[in-house]
Image (spheres, rainbow, N blue to C red):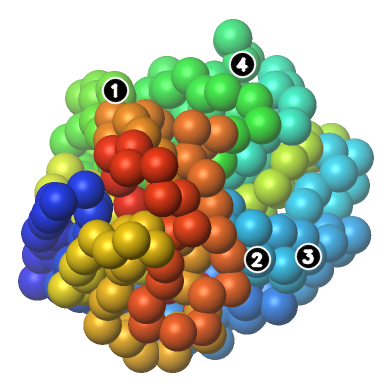
Amino acid sequence: MRSFITTLILTGLISFAYTADLAQNLVAYYPFNGNSNDESGNNFHATVYGATLSTDRFGDADKAYYFDGTSAHLEVANNSVLNPLYTYTVSAWVNVSTGKTYAGIANSIWDTGSNESGYGLCFTDAAPRIGNIASTTGTSSWWSSGCYTEFELYKWTHIVGTFDGSYAKIYRDGQLVNSIPVSGNIKYNFPNSMWIGRYHDDNEDYYYHGYIDEVRIYDTALTENEVQSLYESEWIIPPNASIVYSGSGPELSWNSVTNAASYNIYSSIDPNAAFPSESWTLETNVTELLWNDPDTSGTMKFYVVVAVN
């Protein structure tokens, strides 16, 4: 089933109501809700080596992992379910502290130089850039089958890599950035583990420096519409929001979201500003289903309401 987004703009209020079935073909899901557990239902829990829980893109504590770039990483033991042969999707939110020549984000790559196998998201040897790379029976090297995107340091960015058996694609913040033809089946010449924050070479390792959150592994290639839906839906925006104006300033109200502990309110005078960014003012830990903006200046603002679980 495909996911879809409906966007509503009403008198200065921006709200996103969505219906999403993003569990289909999901083989591993790491939301990092205070731990490294797999919440897909398959119980492929990750073992933590030196990585520490930190704040996520919403500013919530213990909802993402920080990797020091030296040795910190997560490892998921080898399992055939995590080794798709024909198609895959790897999705992650990243906030990069240091761009490196090589480093792993979420991957099962194992490279001996003469013998390469696996797939996933890694830094590449140029720029640096983030690449969606795979070793397949139709390519001489997994670097030659990679497709890449540039990124900004110190900014949360959604990265998705897919392979549908004919094309490798990479998306940044829900938008397709690069696509190249790739043939063959994915090779697994070793008992490949799945690593987060690490890329494993035959005799050395390359570690990621920064923050990672919301890692997803699918055994199918998500479509462009599904990737866009995934990007939007992971903001968890409550539906049916409305706004009224009074002498005490704008009053926002919205429907409750199941399992939401609180709500964050973002406001900006520029609806086209990158979201989230410094252009948006943030009010956190709102526990009621309504909120009054204390600004009574009459300045036109745009609001985004985000549920936090």
Marks 1 and 2 sit apart, C-alpha to C-alpha, by 32 Å
Residue, far top = 127
The x, y position of residue 67, in whole percent, is: 79, 48
Q: Is residue 91 visible to us here?
A: no
Marks 3 and 4 sit apart, C-alpha to C-alpha, by 26 Å
Residue, far front = 247
Q: What crowding class fits label 2: few (fewer than 14 Cα within 10 Å), some (14-19), or many (20 or more)? A: some
Q: Is residue 5 above or below residue 298?
A: below
Residue position marked by numbered label 1 in the rendering: 178
Q: How many marks?
A: 4
The x, y position of residue 22, in whole percent, is: 26, 70
Marks 1 and 3 sit apart, C-alpha to C-alpha, by 32 Å
Dot 2 lies on which element?
A: loop
For residue 103, which quarter of the picture? top right
- Nearer-the-camera pick, 149 or 251: 251
**Along the horizontal axis of the image, is 47 left or right of 244?**
right
Marks 4 and 1 sit apart, C-alpha to C-alpha, by 16 Å
Asked if the residue under mark 1 is in contact with the one under mark 4, i.e. CB atoms within 8 Å, the reply is: no
Who's the residue at 32% across and 42% down the image? 298
Asked if the residue under mark 2 is in contact with the one under mark 1, i.e. CB atoms within 8 Å, the reply is: no
Marks 2 and 4 sit apart, C-alpha to C-alpha, by 29 Å
Asked if the residue under mark 3 is in contact with the one under mark 1, i.e. CB atoms within 8 Å, the reply is: no
Q: What crowding class fits label 1: few (fewer than 14 Cα within 10 Å), some (14-19), or many (20 or more)? A: some
Residue position marked by numbered label 4 in the rendering: 128
Residue position marked by numbered label 2 in the rendering: 60
Q: What amino acid is found at the position of numbered circle 1 in the picture?
A: Asn
Residue position marked by numbered label 3 in the rendering: 53
**Along the horizontal axis of the image, is 267 left or right of 246?**
right
